[in-house]
Amino acid sequence: MIPAVPTQQNVHASPIPTSGRPEAHFTPAQGWINDPHGLRFVDGLYVLHYQSLPHRTAWGAEMSWGTAVSEDLVHWRQVDPCLTPAGFEVGCWSGCIVTDDDGRERAFYTRVRRNALDRAQVAVARRVGPGLTFASGEDDVVIDGPPDGAVLAFRDPFIWRNQHRWVMIVGAGLADGQGAVLTYESTDLDTWDYVGVLAQGRALTTSENLPEIWECPQMIQYADQAILIISVALDGKAHSVLASVGELSGTDFTVGSWQRLIHGPHAYATTVFLDRDGLPCMMSWLRDVKDLATRVQWVGALSLASTLKLTGGTIAVEPHDLVIAGITTHPTSGGPLVLGTSSAQGAYRARLTGNASATIIDQDETVLLTVTRSEHQVTITPTNSAIESFEAPKGAALDLFIDRGIVEIYSGGNYGAWDCAQTT
């Protein structure tokens, strides 16, 4: 059993520590975090879960579900973990939370065993008492591993209601190197039947020497279309977040072309949720963000919340209204934007219009990232990662959210995240 994390308010009224902890992005009190999941609005609060190892600063299999709550999607308060591995399992990996027909929440998660980390089970945990704690028993396995030997990786269940049935999708990697999303169906959330493959292929490369695993599959439904989101691990390493727009009918999804959902090298394991008004939203893990002190106390941060809009088959990612309201907008004079490392320069938003470009510098006036614009294109040039460009309508505003080393950029429905504090 992993000990509980002490309750921590992730809002710093006192001077920011020299570690450069972000103000508007959730970071753990201590230890390691990765994938967010199970995010929902309950009783006036946003409840967030994430993969957590509170007593080490490197990834390990013994993951628990950390928990944080917020009223505004910006200021998060860390509370005790809601689900920790028992003696019959190594770790409680990513999953989702649904409310059953009796109004009770159930957490479906990836249960991993010592000698089968990739070929996991799907287990269910139920709320214990009035708080946010969940518990699972040894026999609470609803899917006992992959459907056949051709599936070499199997994890990350995501569930939604389809009329009188429940649909579950699970991320997978196949023996031939293709990534896949598998589908299951249930009438009661207890017994699940394997339906088949929802989507499969090579989303990033045609090379048979670079196998893909499609992790953390998510589905967002609109009136007549849906968005399937996957986080693609390439050759065993987290790579990028992709999305496909298609038609969803029951357990059938017509897969369109894959497109890059998030630019930059740091966002991964995107999770989707509905805000208090029912708007589709997303949040991601920002890997590599960490404590900059000599003795590292924490590793990992979560992105700002964004809304996902779908118009005519085109996905538009925009900052959530609560994020805009909760982060101070600084007037811009055309000069460099300073990456804050002290209490005097915390999280802020810079909004540029027209053809304005941006240069982000540190306290020593070292250039860390530049944003340049042509008539229909935005180009981001970080000093610690590859140059990226995307198309944006002429005159589209450029929104930059700057929080310690983290820079998140929105323009014309495009979105990207960069950690400028990391050196090459």
Image (spheres, rainbow, N blue to C red):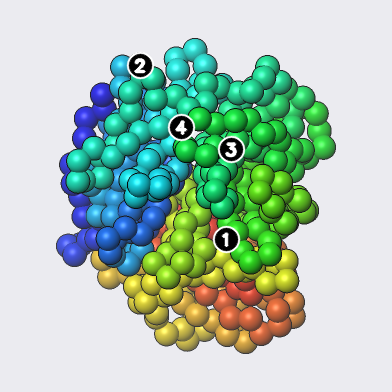
| Residue corresponding to mark 1 | 416
Q: With 123 as the anchor, is 247 left or right in this view?
A: right
> Is residue 142 in sight in this rendering?
yes
Q: Position of residue 124 (x, y in %)?
A: 40, 32
Q: With 8 as the anchor, is 348 left or right in this view?
A: right
Q: CA distance from mark 4 to mark 2?
A: 20 Å
Q: CA distance from mark 1 to mark 4?
A: 39 Å
Q: CA distance from mark 2 to mark 3?
A: 26 Å
Disc 1, disc 2: CB below 8 Å?
Answer: no
In front: label 1 or label 4: 4
| Residue corresponding to mark 4 | 190
Q: Quadrant of residue 14?
A: bottom left
Residue in view at x 36 percent, y 59 percent: 41
In front: label 2 or label 3: 3
- Residue 88 is labelled as 2
Residue in view at x 49 percent, y 67 percent: 279
| Residue type marked 4 | Asp
| Residue type marked 3 | Glu
User: Callout 4 environment at 10 Å: few (<14), some (14 to 19), or many (20+)?
Assistant: few
